[in-house]
């Protein structure tokens, strides 16, 4: 068995219902989590209490990363269950020991962190686009890299069940604009949807944004 999975499965599992808070901003966690199933939503919180969607965490991700990797003793964001979730409960010192002494574990963790870094860089690039069509196209490229699983013929399924409102919060565009642009991208056969999951034709996406993006077959969404 993969050593990473074996380490996680030696820990107890906590369950959270959709919408339930997992960590508050500035909380000092007694332990960290690895996502066994489900999706976590991450928010920044302003001084007046407003929330801004930052990112999602999916199966295999560690949270909060700031604590797991000794960047901070407190959470830097708020974490909420986006769907019903099962999370492995992990002792912080045990996790740090795995990182320090288990090379296979560390390599796999580094791969996930590298994908996250590239994905978030693509998100920043997408948000800088002034044209709504291109902004949404680049956001779908970011979603493919960070949350996608490969299907046949260059199609990628985004493993986060997104609504138009979710995408509006992610891009800063209005829901009305998102509705119009999704209709356009669907007409161009760049995206389709099935049971709230978007499927992206990356070949057609590349034609629109003039970019040689290819799905990363090394990124496997698993625990």
Image (cartoon, helix red, strand yellow):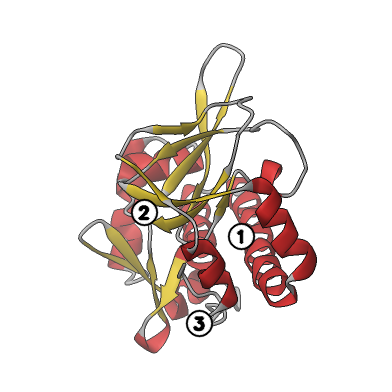
Mark 3 vs mark 2: which is more N-terminal? 3
Mark 1 vs mark 2: which is more N-terminal? 2
CA separation in Å, label 3 and label 1: 29 Å
| Residue 208 x/y as whole percent | 49, 69
Query: Which residue does the numbered mark 2 point to in the structure image?
Result: 38
Q: Residue furthest top?
A: 48
Depicted 121 relative to depicted 187: above or below: above
Mark 3 vs mark 1: which is more N-terminal? 3
CA separation in Å, label 1 and label 2: 19 Å
Residue at left 68%, top 58%?
117
Mark 1 lies on a secondary structure that is helix
Which dot marks residue 1? 3
Mark 3 lies on a secondary structure that is loop
Q: Nearer the viewer, residue 126 or 19?
A: 19
Q: Residues within 10 Å of mark 2 (few under 14, many from 20)?
A: many
Mark 2 lies on a secondary structure that is loop
> Which-is-in-front pick, marks 3 and 2?
3
Query: Which residue does the numbered mark 1 point to in the structure image?
Result: 119
| Residue 153 x/y as whole percent | 38, 88
Q: How many marks?
A: 3
| Residue 120 x/y as whole percent | 63, 54
Depicted 39 relative to depicted 4: above or below: above
Q: Quadrant of residue 145?
A: bottom right
> Which-is-in-front pick, marks 1 and 2?
2
Query: Is residue 145 visible in this depiction of the protein?
Result: yes
């Amino acid at each position: 068995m993969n050593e990473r999975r074996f380490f996680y499965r030696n820990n107890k599992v906590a369950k959270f219902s959709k919408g339930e808070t997992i960590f508050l901003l500035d909380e000092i966690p007694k332990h960290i989590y690895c996502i066994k199933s489900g999706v976590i939503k991450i928010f920044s919180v302003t001084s007046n209490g407003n929330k801004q969607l930052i990112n999602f965490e999916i199966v295999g991700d560690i949270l909060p990363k700031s604590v797991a990797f000794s960047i901070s003793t407190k959470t830097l964001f708020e974490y909420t269950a986006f769907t019903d979730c099962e999370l492995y409960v992990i002792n912080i010192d045990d996790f740090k020991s795995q990182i320090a002494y288990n090379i296979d574990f560390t390599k796999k963790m580094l791969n996930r962190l590298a994908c996250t870094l590239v994905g978030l860089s693509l998100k920043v690039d997408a948000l800088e686009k002034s044209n709504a069509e291109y902004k949404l196209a680049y956001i779908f490229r970011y979603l493919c890299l960070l949350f996608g699983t490969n299907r046949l013929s260059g199609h990628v399924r985004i493993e986060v069940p997104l609504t138009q409102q979710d995408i509006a919060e992610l891009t800063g565009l209005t829901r009305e604009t998102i509705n119009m642009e999704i209709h356009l991208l669907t007409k161009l056969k760049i995206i389709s949807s099935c049971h709230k999951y978007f499927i992206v034709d990356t070949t057609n996406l590349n034609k629109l944004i003039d970019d040689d993006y290819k799905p990363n077959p090394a990124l496997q969404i698993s625990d």
